[in-house]
Every structure is written in structure tokens, then in C-alpha cells.
Image: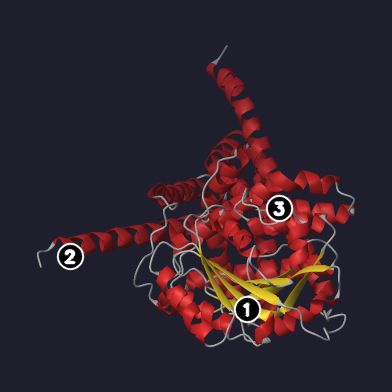
């Protein structure tokens, strides 16, 4: 037997295995891309519908405002002051500061609560010695002494407007409404490229996803903050549980399984701080991604057999499993090099297949995401040209964060448990991020892997240039390379800066007085 047939016998199964894996991964990404188009269509169909309260309370009900926090010294005073200044009858309003802090935040929060108590505000400071259950545990503990029929929740980086409760409470005159979610606004939207990108990502989630789902009759989730719950709903759904990292999504689906309705109010905005540095953003994304997959594993089987419409079940499937796209993107990136080399070297006359696959990815992946986020910005009357110019940034950030989030998906699928890592808050000093708040979960190895993927993409670019008929893949490869280098490089810079600041502090402390 000649050498050529032997090579063909060995390589042909490898080529087909790779082709099936590549095309299969591409199809999975394309399915979620098509779903984005569907959400945009639903949004356009329902955007002009207005939600109004069924009626107004003749006598306002008692409300408890819960503020869970952990080591939030930079923003503790701001959120406590904002909550205590809310325009609501004093005798009907209770403020609970649920503090698990082990640093100076505890002193600051306690002092602000004492100040507002002297001003006549019913504010309760609760400090736990241990973080059992993390945020979910703090909220559950607060329920024991909560006096309100309705529970408003705000994370420490939010600044609720004075009128928040009066604008939202009357929607609960509908006895079926169990939760009202408002839209997040962004205090530091234009601070950097990173915050601009995050703002657009969140605008897409709230304006497009929440509006499309809620107004078309499918389920949405509470986003952990800037929302108001009916206390009865929390109890009927089984209360706060901490077996996932997204206790908000978990409780939301349990409540809707129990028959409660949720309402999203895009016209009511509650401003908050975006993570100003990359490792904070990555930590937040890791928690959201892993928690969503954990919730899917926990509750999706119950949703699929629940007595609800097939449309609700299908949308829940897409909603809870959508973070898996990050894993598919990472797998696709790892297959770029062998796909270029094997396919075009061994089936050169079938190069049209590579072109078709590339165009499919572009149309169903990149273009669907672009349409999704451009629509969210145009709905806010932001400039079309400026928004289009920001699309490459969004694509790069989304691709660059994929490996970080793919690890989160794998951890969730394998049942790996991890603690709730809070997103560091910088407060008014975030513009320059003068000090770097360390994040234990953000290991140096991740940013090194991201940078390595950037160099891997450079090699794919080189191969695509030298091999005939592969130029169609260059835009994708460049986008992937930029994304990995941006996320990995900026993350490495923050690690280096954190090390340098820590080292300098140690040298200062070691100097004799």
C-alpha cells in the first residue's frame, strides 16, 4: 500500500470528525443567533405598549427596603442615604441594612443608620458574623424582622430615586403581580470603553430581552436589585435559597412556577455603578453565567413539565441556557486552526463549504448581535452612527470574555461549588480607579490563557493568509484576536498593578518610624 492512501485512511476520519464538530458548534451558535432576531421582532411588536397600574391604593401599604452589603465602604453611605430619603410615609417605611462586612464598611453603615434613626427614619442595622448563604442568606435573615407587605431590594452600588416606591407600588393593586422589576441606568456609562460596552450589554438585556419576554407573555427574572417583591410571593415560592449563584433567577422561576406574574417597567430607571475595571467585570460575568446554568440544571426540568404554554417553556430554555454560547464560542475558536488547515488542505475543491459556513456565522452570530444591541440604543434615541461604531468593541468584549464564562459553564455542569464573590464597588472615585480591589476568584492563569488564545488567533490569521481560499475568515479571526488580547491584556495589567501597589505598601510599612 502506498504512502498516500495510508495518509488518506488516517486523515479522512479526522477530517469528518472535525467537520461534524465544527458544523455542530456553528449550528448551536446560529440557533441562539436566530433567537436574538426573534427577541428583536417581539420587542418591536410590543415596545409601544404602556403598562399602567390597574388602580391606585387608597391607603399605601407598608414597605421594607432591604440593602444587602458586604465590604462596601466606598458606597455604603450613598445607598443608605438614598434609601432613607425615599418619598414614602415614614410610619409605613422600614429600611433594613443587611451587612455581612468584615472591614470598615460595618462602622460606616452603622453610623449612617444611627444618624438616620435620630432623624426619625425607621432604619434597622443587621450584622451577621458569618456569611452563611451569602446574599440570599442575608435577605432571608432580614425577612425575619421585616414589617412590610412588600420588599424592595437594592444592591449597594445603586442610587434609588426618591420617587421609586410611589412609581412602582401601585402596580401591585393587581393581586396576581408578584414582582416588579425596573430598568438599570448607569452612573459611569461614559467613563471608559469597558463601561460603555457594559452599558450597551445591559441595555440589550433590559430593553430588548425583558420587554420582549414580559410583554409577549413569557417569563422574566428579577435582576437581584432595583425591584419590588410582594412578600407573599417570596414565601409562596419557598423563600431565598443559596444553592445557586443567582438566587434572584432561582426565586424568579420558582415564583412563576407557583403561578405569580412579573412585570417589567422600562420607563422606571434606577441608576447604578458599572464595574470600572476588567477583573471586576469578569468576576461578575463568571457569577452570572455559572448561576444561570446552575438554575437551568435545578429548575428547567420542572419548567418543561409544568402546565404552562409551549412558548413559555421554549423561552425559558433559551433564557436559562443562553450562557452556554460562551462555551460554544470558545470551542469554535479552538477549532479554527485545524478547520482551516485540514478542510482546505484536503478538500480544496470544496472551499465553498468554508465560505458558506463563514457567512452563516457572520449572519446568524455577528449580525444578530449587532442588530440586537443597535436596536436597544436606537430605542433610547442614541445616535445610529455612534452606536454602529461601537459594535466592534461589543463584539471584541463578548468574544474576549468567552473563555472566562466558558469556565463558569463547565464548573456549573460539573457541579463545582464556589462562593458568592461580590463585585467590588469604587463609588465616586471609580473614574481613575486609583486603588485596585483584589478579587480572590480572578486568578492570573485565566488572563494568561486569554493572552495565549490571542496569539493562537494570530497564528490562525497567518495560516488564513498563506492558504488559498481562506480570506473570508480573516474578519472573524481578527475580531477574536483583538477580543482575547483586550480582555487578557487589561486583566494582566490590573493584576500587575495590584501586585505593585501591594508591594509598595509592604515596603512602606517595613520602613522604620
Q: In this view, does 216 lie to the left or right of 30?
A: right
x%, y% of residue 52? 83, 81
- Label 3 with label 2: CB-CB less than 8 Å: no
Q: What element carries label 3?
A: helix
Graded by Cα atoms within 10 Å as few (under 14), some (14 to 19) or many (20 or more), the crowding at tag 1 reads many
Q: Residue at x 64, y 26 (%)?
A: 13
Q: In which quarter of the image is residue 285?
A: bottom right
Q: In this view, does 71 lie above or below 357?
A: below
**Residue 270: which numbered mark, if any?**
1
Q: Is residue 93 above or below residue 202?
A: below
Q: Which residue lies furthest to the top in this view?
A: 1
Q: Name the residue under label 3.
A: 320
Q: Report the front residue among 25 and 1.
A: 25
Q: Which residue is drawn at 29% across and 58% down?
A: 499
x%, y% of residue 397? 53, 62
Query: CA separation, marks 3 and 1?
Result: 25 Å
- Label 3 with label 1: CB-CB less than 8 Å: no
Q: Mark 2 points at which residue?
A: 508
Would residue 41 be visible to someone looking at this image? no
x%, y% of residue 245? 59, 53
Q: In this view, does 140 lie above or below 210?
A: above
Q: Residue at x 59, y 56 (%)?
A: 137
- Mark closer to the observer (3, 1): 1
Query: CA separation, marks 3 and 2?
Result: 49 Å
x%, y% of residue 409? 59, 46
Q: In which quarter of the image is residue 474?
A: bottom right
Mark 3 or 1, nearer chain start: 1
Mark 2 or 1, nearer chain start: 1
Q: Which residue is drawn at 62% across and 56% down?
A: 246
Amino acid at each position: 500500500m502506498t504512502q498516500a492512501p495510508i495518509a488518506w485512511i488516517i486523515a479522512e476520519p479526522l477530517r469528518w470528525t472535525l467537520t461534524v464538530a465544527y458544523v455542530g458548534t456553528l449550528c448551536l451558535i446560529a440557533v441562539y443567533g436566530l433567537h436574538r432576531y426573534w427577541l428583536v421582532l417581539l420587542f418591536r411588536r410590543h415596545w409601544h405598549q404602556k403598562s399602567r397600574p390597574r388602580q391606585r391604593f387608597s391607603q399605601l401599604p407598608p414597605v421594607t427596603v432591604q440593602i444587602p452589603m458586604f465590604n462596601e465602604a466606598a458606597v455604603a453611605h450613598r445607598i443608605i442615604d438614598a434609601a432613607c430619603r425615599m418619598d414614602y410615609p415614614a410610619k409605613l417605611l422600614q429600611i433594613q441594612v443587611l451587612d455581612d462586612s468584615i472591614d470598615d464598611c460595618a462602622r460606616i453603615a452603622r453610623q449612617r443608620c444611627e444618624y438616620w434613626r435620630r432623624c426619625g427614619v425607621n432604619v434597622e442595622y443587621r450584622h451577621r458574623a458569618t456569611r452563611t448563604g451569602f446574599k440570599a442568606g442575608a435577605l432571608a435573615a432580614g425577612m425575619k424582622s421585616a414589617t412590610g407587605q412588600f420588599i424592595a431590594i437594592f444592591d449597594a452600588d445603586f442610587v434609588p430615586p426618591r420617587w421609586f416606591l410611589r412609581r412602582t407600588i401601585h402596580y401591585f393593586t393587581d393581586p396576581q403581580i408578584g414582582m416588579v422589576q425596573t430598568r438599570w441606568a448607569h452612573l459611569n456609562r461614559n467613563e471608559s470603553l469597558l463601561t460603555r460596552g457594559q452599558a450597551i450589554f445591559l441595555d440589550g438585556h433590559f430593553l430588548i430581552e425583558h420587554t420582549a419576554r414580559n410583554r409577549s407573555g413569557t417569563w422574566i427574572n428579577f435582576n437581584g436589585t432595583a425591584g419590588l417583591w410582594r412578600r407573599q410571593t417570596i414565601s409562596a415560592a419557598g423563600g431565598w435559597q443559596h444553592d445557586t449563584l443567582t438566587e434572584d433567577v432561582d426565586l424568579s422561576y420558582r415564583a412563576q412556577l407557583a403561578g405569580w406574574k412579573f412585570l417589567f417597567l422600562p420607563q422606571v430607571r434606577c441608576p447604578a455603578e458599572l464595574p470600572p475595571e476588567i477583573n471586576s467585570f469578569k468576576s461578575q460575568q463568571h457569577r452570572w453565567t455559572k448561576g444561570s446554568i446552575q438554575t437551568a440544571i435545578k429548575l428547567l426540568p420542572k419548567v418543561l413539565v409544568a402546565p404552562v404554554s409551549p412558548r413559555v417553556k421554549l423561552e425559558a430554555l433559551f433564557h436559562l441556557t443562553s450562557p452556554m454560547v460562551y462555551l460554544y464560542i470558545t470551542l469554535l475558536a479552538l477549532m479554527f486552526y485545524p478547520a482551516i488547515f485540514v478542510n482546505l488542505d484536503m478538500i480544496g475543491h470544496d472551499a465553498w463549504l468554508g465560505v458558506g459556513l463563514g457567512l452563516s456565522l457572520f449572519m446568524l452570530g455577528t449580525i444578530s448581535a449587532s442588530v440586537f444591541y443597535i436596536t436597544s440604543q436606537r430605542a433610547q434615541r442614541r445616535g445610529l452612527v455612534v452606536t454602529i461604531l461601537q459594535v466592534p468593541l461589543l463584539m471584541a468584549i463578548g468574544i474576549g470574555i468567552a473563555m472566562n464564562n466558558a469556565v463558569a459553564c463547565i464548573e456549573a455542569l460539573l457541579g463545582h461549588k464556589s462562593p458568592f464573590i461580590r463585585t467590588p464597588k469604587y463609588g465616586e472615585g471609580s473614574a481613575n480607579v486609583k486603588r485596585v480591589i483584589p478579587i480572590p476568584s480572578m486568578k492570573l492563569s485565566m488572563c494568561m490563557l486569554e493572552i495565549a488564545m490571542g496569539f493562537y488567533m494570530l497564528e490562525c490569521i497567518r495560516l488564513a493568509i498563506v492558504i488559498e481560499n481562506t480570506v473570508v475568515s480573516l474578519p472573524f479571526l481578527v475580531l477574536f484576536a483583538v477580543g482575547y488580547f483586550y480582555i487578557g491584556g487589561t486583566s494582566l495589567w490590573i493584576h500587575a498593578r495590584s501586585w505593585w501597589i501591594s508591594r509598595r505598601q509592604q515596603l512602606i510599612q517595613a520602613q522604620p518610624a
